[in-house]
Image (cartoon, grey):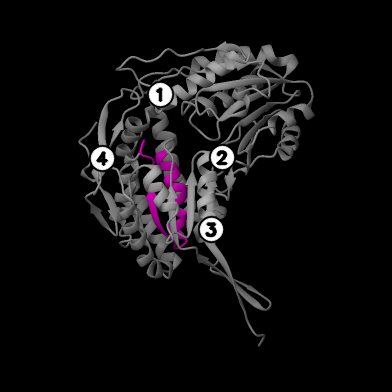
């Protein structure tokens, strides 16, 4: 690891890297359990200062022409490109992401996402004329952006870039588990010439900094990604002040193998798509396809394919280019996932691959090998609750109506997938109560909206949809001439 960045130990408030007033938080490499950096344990007073800076910067920034904001964002992206190798190194160190995945998904894909937001912003008209009125989009105001640890850079890009493009100002709190990539991104914004106060960074714990941000009278919109339980608490805090909300929360996504799916290669494609979704971030993905619904008569075929494809996901040292699966983020997450595996065994699910991982030694990382359960019943905890680990539930069904009921039979509705002949798969996808559905080997479209139904959240991110979430429509009624 290259020398530590001196900004790691500071907040960024009103264009200045500030020395913290409180204690420091250790940052652990989850693959080695080495403490390799420290960040500030922010205070409510530092949140006050950051919000005040964002409020002060808002009038000028919101009146800056969109073309000028886009030009500044393009400059930030150029500096982001220059930091590519440093970002990848940090994603490996603070998250334990395998280096190849850190490069492709955690860094290069996020650069594409930034470029997609810039392109989408160009398509937004400032005003829309109606026969007797003019409708304009105005920025909401000060945004509190609170991001999770599982995609440290991507989740910041999803919130900060559209908010700034639309003329909002931002106070950012990244996860205390993966706080360092945010520093590199803030540096790119600073180097690009973004004005002081437009973007502010306060490091710290959710219980202190996050609580201070979500309850702050100076915050107009809260954009949060994390658990449904925390999302509900944030919504409760926001309600008395009528704060706008964008909540991207939990998921328990189902992949459905249709009866018409035939052939070894088609079945292998489905198994690989499911395991890619589940394992490449060690199961720590809100959209992970953690339930695989299979026709009962094809259950053994699906199990054999999954066991075969599992060989393509070697787990180990994230710095090794051959590694495809790294550790979980922390000891707490290790224990959480271990307990879910134990509950699956207790409730009678049948192990097809993996099992209860042993407790790691003092110097071992938080590694959990992939676990595949079969004959999982819909009422089991492993079929209902978000595990956030490499645990797959294979669930047999007898009719399409039963498959749909199982797929929709959780509190979540974030993502799904359907494998089968195109028309049949699209028809089934239309019926699923979920915000995003992949058909066969399709990939995400950065222009499309991302978000969930039911307890998976409120609002949408991505493309024009994600940009407009940071605006308020205003109607001006004009007297006809």
- The residue beneath circle 1 is 327
- The residue beneath circle 2 is 444
Which quadrant: the C terminus?
Answer: bottom right
Separation of residues labelled 1 and 2 (CA atoms): 25 Å
Which quarter of the figure has residue 4?
top left
Is residue 166 a member of the stretch shown in magenta?
yes
Badge number at residue 24? 4
Residue 325 seen in the figure: no
Query: Which of disc 1 and disc 3 is earlier in sequence?
Result: 3
User: Badges 3 and 4: C-beta atoms under 8 Å apart?
Assistant: no
Closer to the eye: label 4 or 2 = 4
Badge number at residue 240? 3
Q: Secondary structure at mark 3?
A: helix
Q: Secondary structure at mark 1?
A: loop
Which residues fall within the magenta stretch?
152-178
Residue 413 is situated, as x and y percent measured from the top left of the image, at 63, 38
């Amino acid at each position: 690891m290259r020398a530590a960045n001196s900004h790691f130990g500071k907040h960024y408030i009103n264009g200045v890297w500030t020395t913290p007033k409180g204690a420091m938080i250790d940052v652990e490499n989850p693959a080695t359990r080495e403490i390799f950096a420290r960040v500030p344990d922010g205070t409510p007073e530092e949140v006050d200062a950051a919000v005040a800076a964002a409020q002060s910067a808002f009038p000028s920034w919101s009146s800056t022409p969109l073309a000028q904001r886009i030009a500044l964002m393009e400059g930030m992206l150029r500096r982001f490109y220059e930091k590519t190798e440093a970002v990848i190194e940090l994603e490996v160190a603070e998250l334990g992401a395998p280096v190849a995945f850190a490069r492709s998904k955690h860094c290069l894909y996020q650069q594409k996402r930034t470029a997609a937001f810039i392109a989408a912003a160009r398509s937004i008209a400032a005003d829309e004329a109606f026969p007797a009125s003019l409708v304009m989009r105005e920025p909401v105001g000060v945004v509190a952006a609170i991001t999770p640890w599982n995609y440290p850079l991507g989740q910041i890009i999803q919130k900060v870039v559209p908010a700034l493009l639309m003329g909002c100002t931002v106070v950012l709190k990244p996860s205390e588990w993966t706080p360092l990539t945010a520093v590199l991104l803030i540096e790119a914004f600073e180097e690009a010439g973004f004005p002081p106060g437009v973007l502010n960074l306060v490091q710290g714990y959710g219980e202190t900094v996050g609580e201070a941000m979500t309850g702050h009278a100076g915050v107009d919109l809260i954009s949060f990604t994390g658990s449904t339980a925390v999302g509900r608490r944030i919504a409760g805090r926001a309600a008395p002040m009528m704060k706008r909300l964008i909540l991207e929360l939990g998921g328990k996504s189902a992949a459905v193998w249709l009866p018409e799916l035939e052939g070894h290669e088609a079945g292998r494609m489905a198994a690989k798509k499911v395991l890619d979704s589940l394992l490449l971030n060690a199961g720590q993905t809100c959209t992970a396809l953690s339930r695989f619904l299979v026709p009962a008569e094809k259950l053994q075929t699906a199990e054999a394919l999954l066991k075969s494809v599992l060989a393509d996901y070697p787990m180990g040292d994230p710095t090794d280019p051959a590694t495809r699966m790294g550790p979980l983020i922390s000891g707490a997450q290790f224990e959480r996932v271990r307990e879910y595996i134990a509950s699956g065994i207790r409730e009678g699910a049948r192990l097809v691959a993996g099992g209860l991982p042993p407790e790691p030694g003092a110097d071992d990382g938080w590694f959990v090998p992939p676990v595949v359960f079969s004959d999982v019943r819909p009422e089991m905890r492993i079929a209902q609750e978000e595990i956030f680990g490499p645990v797959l539930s294979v669930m047999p069904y007898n009719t399409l109506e039963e498959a749909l009921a199982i797929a929709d039979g959780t509190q979540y509705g974030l993502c799904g997938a359907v494998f089968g002949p195109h028309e049949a798969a699209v028809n089934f996808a239309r019926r699923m109560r979920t915000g995003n559905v992949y058909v066969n080997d399709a990939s995400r479209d950065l222009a499309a909206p991302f978000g969930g139904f039911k307890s998976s959240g409120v609002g949408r991110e991505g493309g024009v949809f994600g940009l407009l979430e940071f605006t308020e429509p205003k109607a001006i009624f004009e007297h006809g001439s």
